[in-house]
Amino acid sequence: MKNTASYSHLFFDLDHTLWDFDKNAEVSLSEIFIEFSLSSVISAEFSDFYQKYLHHNKILWERYHHGYISADDLKWKRMWRTLMDFKIADEKLSKKLAERFLEILPTKKEIFPHTKEILTYLNNKNYKLHLITNGFKKTQWMKVKNSGLDPFFINMITSECSNSLKPKKEIFEYALNKAGANVFESIMLGDNPDADIKGACNAGMHSVYVNHIKGNNLDYATYNISHLSELEHLF
């Protein structure tokens, strides 16, 4: 259904919304797994390593979102916890893996289907597009550039430049100020029910829940979609 609100500024999340973090992370980690000969270190297959990494990455990102751990802790402790599952307590190796992972990851280019098409459509309709991300500034800019998304966006607001994190309202207020937008003409689009959708609610913004995994809809989201192409019906 077409929206009845008058939006001018669209604020997108990046990872898991436009840029396919899981696919890009899997390829990056597979390269690291070979480079560091991890099969002999942990005596397990890559698939086991990858699934445990995803588990710990999700938990630590949630802790980071809520300010319980620092960015530096997130970067290396997801590797540390993964290795610990294989009874390998090696902080030095964990930090080497984390450093190499963040070198490789942003070079990957996998985005969700219809991403560039929908961004082109929105640009052609004169919407002003921005990014709000809890990711790390240097890494996120490299992802955007290498995947060919940089021409579509005017601003990228990160937790580092705003000194805040989604779902806190301050990062959204910073983003609105940076864009020269008011909350009534702005809408947040993202995949994370807490960071993106509750965060938008905290700031008094409307939201679009981009439900790629086709889970339950969110009653506190203004709109729910399961594919980016559906944005053509909203805007």
Image: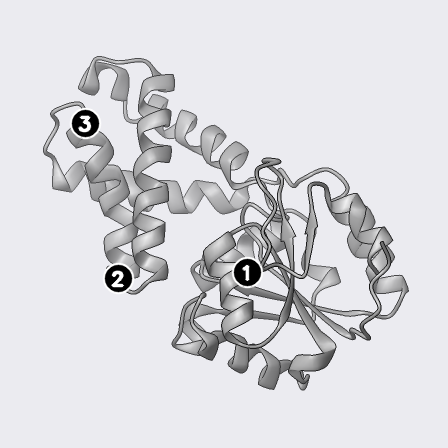
Label number found at residue 209: none
Q: CA distance from mark 3 to mark 1?
A: 32 Å
Q: What amino acid type is highlighted by mark number 2?
A: Ser
Q: Is residue 72 above or below residue 113?
A: below
User: Which residue is labeled 1 in the image?
Assistant: 197
Q: What amino acid type is highlighted by mark number 3?
A: Asp
Dot 2 falls on a residue whose secondary structure is loop
Q: What amino acid type is highlighted by mark number 1?
A: Ile
Q: Is residue 108 above or below residue 180?
A: above
Task: Identify the residue at image location x=24%, y=41%.
Answer: 96
Dot 3 falls on a residue whose secondary structure is helix
Instruction: Give the image location of residue 208, x and y in percent.
Output: 66, 57
Instruction: Give the image location of residue 7, x and y in percent.
Output: 78, 73
Label number found at residue 70: 2
Q: CA distance from mark 2 to mark 3?
A: 22 Å
Dot 3: within a 10 Å radius of its alpha carbon, few (fewer than 14), some, or many (20 or more) residues?
Answer: few
Q: Closer to the N terminus: mark 2 or mark 1? A: 2
On screen, residue 235 versus residue 39, left or right, reads: right
Q: Closer to the N terminus: mark 3 or mark 1? A: 3
Label number found at residue 85: 3
Instruction: Give the image location of residue 199, x and y in percent.
Output: 50, 66
Front residue (pair 54, 216): 216
